[in-house]
Image (spheres, helix red, strand yellow):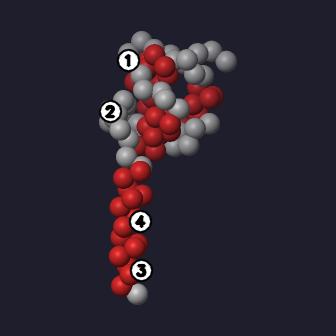
Amino acid sequence: MINLVIMAKCLSSICAVSHVVKGNFLKGVIATPARRALEKEKIDSLEKLSDYSEKEIMQLHGFGKNTMQKLKVYMNQNHVSFKNN
């Protein structure tokens, strides 16, 4: 039984480490799940983000209406927009 508890603690720390976002791109603008999804797609700048359509980004895990609204406001403030469909 003790071995199971120790193994569970080890596994939970491994899972926590594997879900950390490495860069600071959009930190404080959108939530971590959405930032991880962008990182997975190698989107780490507004320039790269502008190569995608809003529809393409909405298909990523972690993106919903609220996150997209925050992202669009931030992009607008930085004079960047999604590509047209």
- Residue 43 is situated, as x and y percent measured from the top left of the image, at 48, 27
| Residue under pointer 4 | 11
Q: Secondary structure at mark 2?
A: loop
- Residue 30 is situated, as x and y percent measured from the top left of the image, at 40, 36
| Residue under pointer 2 | 24
| Residue under pointer 3 | 4
Quarter holding the N terminus is bottom left
Residue type, label 4? Leu
Task: Tell me the distance, in whole angstroms, between the alpha carbons under discs 1 and 3.
Answer: 51 Å
Q: Secondary structure at mark 4?
A: helix
| Residue under pointer 1 | 77
Q: Which residue is the extreme one toward the top?
A: 79
Q: Earlier in the sequence, mark 4 or mark 2?
A: 4
Residue at image coords 50%, 37% = 40
Bin the neighbour count of mark 2 within 10 Å (Cα to Cα): few under 14, some 14-19, many 20 and up.
Answer: few
Residue type, label 1? Gln
